[in-house]
Structure formats: structure tokens, C-alpha cells
Image (spheres, rainbow, N blue to C red):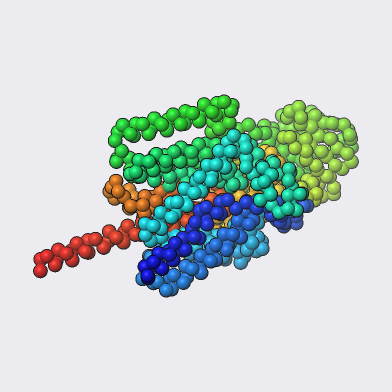
């Protein structure tokens, strides 16, 4: 009777992990909120925004995290004999401490406590991540636990396969009326129905994860687990099914058009296979490799039919406007275009444009268009003290007063355009869909946030948003808000401090090292336990996440799954070590007994 109660309790304790794996990724609900940025010159006056993917998801994760934390405390207190070694989680504990300190000294404490602007990764969410990893590590014990988790992973894969399949063929389920009625209230449906199609448009696979890049990261983690399970499965029917799921996952990854995810998927195919390929006959390996080559050849043919939508992104050519910088002061408006410096200013009721390549200035009277030599659509005109400059497909408004030439910001305030401190990327700011531009403006900020960060969800408020010229060139819009560094390590450094990033990296190193010792330096058998197989799959999934984090941020769409997988992998590693650490002792005891 006691054993039955214990098993039932173990099933109940797995529910939080299942919610993270299956329910949280599908949580989509319309929320209307105020980001509070209207007080900044670089933001428009109306700061009321709509969010489908993060607002309610963050609160759901907070609830799961709090309940899980309570359960974990009781378990650690009541079953001390079952407590696993916690030393590897010490760096994460220090990380949480610095996240809390950064919240206390945050530039926007309210945002750090509640979350804000398209992210909603509050300090509670960041701590919940660590709690979920620790919970999975402590709670996963027997084969049945791993079986339930594996079935949960298969469940979300089936749902994603259906949603992604529709999106590939341009039929997003979230565009259907019956679905929109589910993800918003009745009043919201009356107001927004038919006006949100741009949010759910295109044939890119983004699932229910807001952004194709986030979908790519999540799919790579799921693909890693499925691929390992397929390679290690000894029942033929199940193995074929898992290989089919692997092919579906690869197809969905391709149609996210995420380059980082594609590279991660290739790494998973190579590195993840090292443990099990020796069990396969050479003819099966040849068939498998041929099937993968055929699959990618099919992808390339489909891409060619779509005018190389994917492969054209791989070259990452610089097709942006050659506008280098733009400033304004008491003398005029100064900008560099195609390595030529220009000055635009008013003098004696005349608009003049001079350059360092021409001795004769271009001039125009009030109301007359001044055609500029940068292109057919580049021109300027002035009315009174206002100058309208059309450049790089944007209309910029400047006003001359006693202090100089002032730019009309998105909030309709007047401020001078100033030079922005940046790292020299030698003209390669356009790389990675302009990630180089964001990184070049982020790197100079790191010194200010080595110990204490600006606070969770405050990156947008410390990034130099007044770099209007840079955003024109690399974001095609001076009003664009850069809310993340598109590099999780840089974003964490700014928001929770450099020491917190060091703690995360130490945890990653310990995680990878412990996995290498178990998964790559031990022998495998055809009847290897589900615990080892699933643990290895989660281990490879976590490594793919660490890689893609170089080009993506931590988000509510991707990070919860990563931290749960990290806990599962560590639990598998710990159990293997514990069992095999006892074997020599038992063997020695048997030997001594025999000798006596």
C-alpha cells in the first residue's frame, strides 16, 4: 500500500514539468498593456501595446514556479536522504542573487518586477527558470518518470507538427475566426478581429512562439531528443516512428528560415549521433545518410522554387543604405553617405548642402525641393525653420532654433542628433540581420554593468535608442525600439550584470563537462535504459540552446524548455554516477566475503 501511494505521488510531482513542456508553449492570449516608454524622446506618445505570446505566459510560469518551489522545499526538508548533490547549482544561486540585486537597483523597478515590452522576463521568471531546473533534477528518479516526460515531449511534437504543417502551406491556424475567439475576450474580438492578420502572416513556421527564430530554437531542442531516441530505440516500429518525427522536425526547422537553428540542427545530427552510430550496420548508416542528403536536396529544390528565400539569407549581403552616421548641432545637419561627408543648413533664407567632394553648394529657396546627390528619392525642403529631409526611405524633420538644429523625435520632442559610442565592426554591422549593429552599440555599455545590471527587462531603456541614423540604416525605421541584444549573453550582462553571466557560463561548463564524462566516455548497450537515452537527448538539446543563444535571446518561448531539459539531463548523469560509484564497493565487499 505504501509503495502504491509513493508511485501515485511521483506521478503528481511530474505535472509541473509536463505543464512546462506541453501547456506553456501553447499559451496564447491577447493582453493590452502600457510599456511606460512614453516619457522617453525615442518612443511615440502612445505606449499602449497588444501582446499575444508573453504577458499571460509569464504569469503562468510565475504560478508554476512558486508552486514548484514550495513543493521542492517540502521535499528537501522531509526527504533529506533523497536529496541529490546540489553543488552544480551554486553558480545559478549566485546568478539569482545578482538578478535580485539588479532588480533592487533597476532603472525601472516596476518593469523588472512585472516584466515589460515583448519579453516579460521579470526577475520572478528568471528565478522560476532555475527552480524548474532544480525541480527536474531532484524529482526525476525512476524509469517511469522518464517515460512520462518522453510521452509529454511526443505530445507537444505532434501538436507542433500540425500547427507547423499548416503554416508551411500558408494556412496559419491562428488566423481562423474560431481560434481567434479562443485567444481573446469577446470584447477584444469585436475590436481586433480581422485586424491582426499581419501578426499571423507569411509561410514562415513560428508555431505559437511569436518569432520564427524562437520556433527554430525550440524545434532544435525537441529534434535533439527525438533524434537520440530514434537512434537508441531497439523496437523497429518505434524507431521508424521516431525517425519520421525527426524528419518532420527538420522540415519545420528549415521553414523557420533561421540560420542559427539550421546550423544547430546539423550539429545535433553529427554530435548527437556519436554515441549510437557504432551499433548500426554500415548499410543502415549509408541508408540514413542518403536519406538525410535527399531530404536536404528536397529542401533546396523547394527553396529554389521560392526564389531562394532561404539560401539568399545565408550569404548575408550588405544591401543597406550606405548612410554611416548623422548628427546635428548649431552649424547644421551633418551626415556621411557612401563615404562622402555632407552638411545641410539654412543661411539667408536659403537651404544649402555642401560636401567634401564638391566646392559648389547645392541651394534651394523656401518651398523648393533640393535634390541631393545620394539618389533619386533623396531630397530636402524647408518651410520657415523646419527642414524636411527625405533619405534612406525615411522622412526626417529638423527644426532650427537658437540652440541649433534639432531633430523631431518619435514623441514629437526636439533634441539634437548626437554621435553614439560604438565598437568598430569595420563595416560589418549588417551581419546576422544587423545583429552586428546591435552588438556594436551594446559592447560599450558592458563596463557600466559588470557588477549590477540595469534590471531584468530594461535593456531597451539603456540601449542608445537615440541612434536614429543607425536605426534608419539597419532597422529601416528611426522609430524602431531595440529591446534585446539578440545575444543572450550580452542581454544578461546588461540586465543582470557581468558576474551573473560569468555564473551562467560556469554552470554551462560544469554541465557540459559532466555530460562528456558520462555520455561520451561510457559504453552503450542495445538495451540502454530510457533514463540514459532521454538524459542524453536533453543534454544535446541543451548544448544546441547554448549555441543558438549566441544569436538569440532568452525568451518565455524557449528558455523554460531548456531549463527543464537541463534538470533532466543532470538527473540522468547523477543517477548513473551514483549507481556506478556503488558498484566497485559492492564488488569489493563480495570479494572480501569470498576470501573470508
The residue drawn where x is 45% and y is 41% is: 245
125 relative to 401, above or below? below
Residue 200 seen in render: yes
Please tell me whether residue 339 is drawn above or below residue 504 in the rendered image. Answer: above
The answer to whether 106 appears left or right of 265 in the picture is: right
Of residue 462 and residue 424, the one placed in the foreground of this image is: 462
In this picture, residue 201 sits left or right of residue 4: right
Query: Which quadrant holds residue 277?
Result: top left
Residue 30 placement (x, y as % from top left): 68, 52
Looking at this rendering, what residue extends furthest in the bottom direction? 78
Q: Is residue 469 visible?
A: no
State the residue at coordinates (41%, 48%): 537
Q: List x then y, in percent, for residue 444.
A: 59, 51
Q: Position of residue 392 (x, y in %)?
A: 72, 35
Residue drawn 67% across the image and 42% down it: 176
Please state, as top left, top right, bottom left or bottom right, where the C terminus lies in the image.
bottom left
Front residue of 331/495: it is 495
**Residue 341 placement (x, y as % from top left):** 71, 35
Pick the front one: 472 or 384:
472
Amino acid at each position: 500500500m505504501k509503495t502504491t501511494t509513493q508511485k501515485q505521488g511521483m506521478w503528481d510531482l511530474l505535472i509541473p514539468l509536463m505543464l512546462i513542456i506541453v501547456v506553456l508553449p501553447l499559451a496564447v492570449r491577447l493582453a493590452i498593456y502600457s510599456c511606460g516608454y512614453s516619457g522617453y524622446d525615442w518612443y511615440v506618445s502612445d505606449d499602449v501595446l497588444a501582446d499575444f505570446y508573453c504577458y499571460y505566459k509569464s504569469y503562468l510560469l510565475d504560478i508554476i514556479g512558486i508552486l514548484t518551489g514550495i513543493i521542492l522545499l517540502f521535499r528537501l526538508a522531509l526527504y533529506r536522504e533523497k536529496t541529490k548533490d546540489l553543488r552544480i547549482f551554486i553558480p545559478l544561486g549566485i546568478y539569482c542573487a545578482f538578478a535580485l540585486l539588479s532588480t533592487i537597483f533597476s532603472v525601472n523597478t516596476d518593469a523588472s518586477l512585472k516584466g515589460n515590452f515583448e519579453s516579460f522576463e521579470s526577475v520572478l521568471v528568471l528565478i522560476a527558470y532555475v527552480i524548474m531546473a532544480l525541480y527536474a533534477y531532484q524529482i526525476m528518479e525512476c524509469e517511469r518518470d522518464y517515460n512520462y516526460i518522453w510521452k509529454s515531449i511526443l505530445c507537444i511534437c505532434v501538436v507542433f507538427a500540425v500547427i507547423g504543417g499548416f503554416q508551411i502551406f500558408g494556412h496559419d491556424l491562428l488566423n481562423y475566426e474560431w481560434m481567434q475567439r479562443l485567444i481573446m475576450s469577446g470584447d477584444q474580438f469585436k475590436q481586433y478581429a480581422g485586424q491582426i492578420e499581419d501578426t499571423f502572416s507569411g509561410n514562415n513556421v513560428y508555431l505559437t512562439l511569436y518569432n520564427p527564430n524562437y520556433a527554430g530554437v525550440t524545434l532544435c531542442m525537441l529534434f535533439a531528443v527525438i533524434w537520440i531516441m530514434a537512434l537508441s530505440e531497439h523496437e523497429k516500429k518505434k524507431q521508424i516512428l521516431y525517425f519520421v518525427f525527426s524528419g518532420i522536425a527538420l522540415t519545420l526547422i528549415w521553414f523557420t528560415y533561421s540560420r542559427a537553428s539550421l546550423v544547430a540542427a546539423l550539429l545535433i545530427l553529427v554530435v548527437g549521433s556519436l554515441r549510437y552510430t557504432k551499433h548500426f550496420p554500415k548499410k543502415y548508416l549509408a541508408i540514413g545518410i542518403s536519406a538525410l542528403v535527399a531530404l536536404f536536396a528536397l529542401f533546396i529544390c523547394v527553396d529554389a522554387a521560392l526564389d531562394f528565400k532561404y539560401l539568399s539569407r545565408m550569404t548575408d549581403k550588405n544591401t543597406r543604405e550606405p548612410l554611416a552616421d548623422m548628427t546635428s548641432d548649431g552649424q547644421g545637419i551633418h551626415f556621411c553617405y557612401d563615404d562622402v561627408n555632407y552638411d545641410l543648413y539654412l543661411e539667408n533664407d536659403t537651404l544649402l548642402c555642401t560636401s567634401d567632394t564638391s566646392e559648389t553648394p547645392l541651394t534651394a529657396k523656401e518651398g523648393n525641393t533640393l535634390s541631393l546627390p545620394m539618389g533619386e528619392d533623396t531630397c530636402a525642403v524647408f518651410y520657415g525653420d523646419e527642414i524636411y529631409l527625405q533619405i534612406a526611405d525615411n522622412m526626417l524633420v529638423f527644426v532650427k532654433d537658437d540652440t541649433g538644429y534639432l531633430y523631431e523625435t518619435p514623441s514629437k520632442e526636439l533634441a539634437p542628433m548626437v554621435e553614439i559610442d560604438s565598437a568598430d565592426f569595420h563595416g560589418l554591422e549588417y551581419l546576422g540581420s544587423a545583429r552586428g549593429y546591435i552588438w556594436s552599440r551594446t559592447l560599450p555599455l558592458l563596463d557600466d554593468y559588470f557588477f549590477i545590471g540595469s534590471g531584468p527587462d530594461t535593456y531597451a531603456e539603456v540601449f542608445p535608442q537615440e541612434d536614429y541614423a543607425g536605426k534608419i540604416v539597419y532597422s529601416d525605421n528611426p522609430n524602431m525600439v531595440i529591446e534585446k541584444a539578440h545575444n543572450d549573453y550580452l542581454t544578461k550582462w546588461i540586465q543582470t550584470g557581468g558576474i551573473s553571466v560569468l555564473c551562467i557560463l560556469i554552470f554551462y561548463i560544469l554541465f557540459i563537462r559532466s555530460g562528456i564524462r558520462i555520455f561520451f566516455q561510457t559504453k552503450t548497450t542495445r538495451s540502454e535504459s530510457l533514463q540514459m537515452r532521454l538524459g542524453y537527448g536533453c543534454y544535446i538539446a541543451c548544448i544546441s540552446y547554448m549555441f543558438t543563444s549566441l544569436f538569440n535571446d532568452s525568451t518565455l518561448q524557449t528558455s523554460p524548455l531548456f531549463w527543464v531539459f537541463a534538470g533532466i539531463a543532470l538527473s540522468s548523469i547523477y543517477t548513473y554516477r551514483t549507481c556506478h560509484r556503488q558498484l566497485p564497493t559492492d564488488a569489493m565487499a563480495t570479494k572480501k566475503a569470498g576470501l573470508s
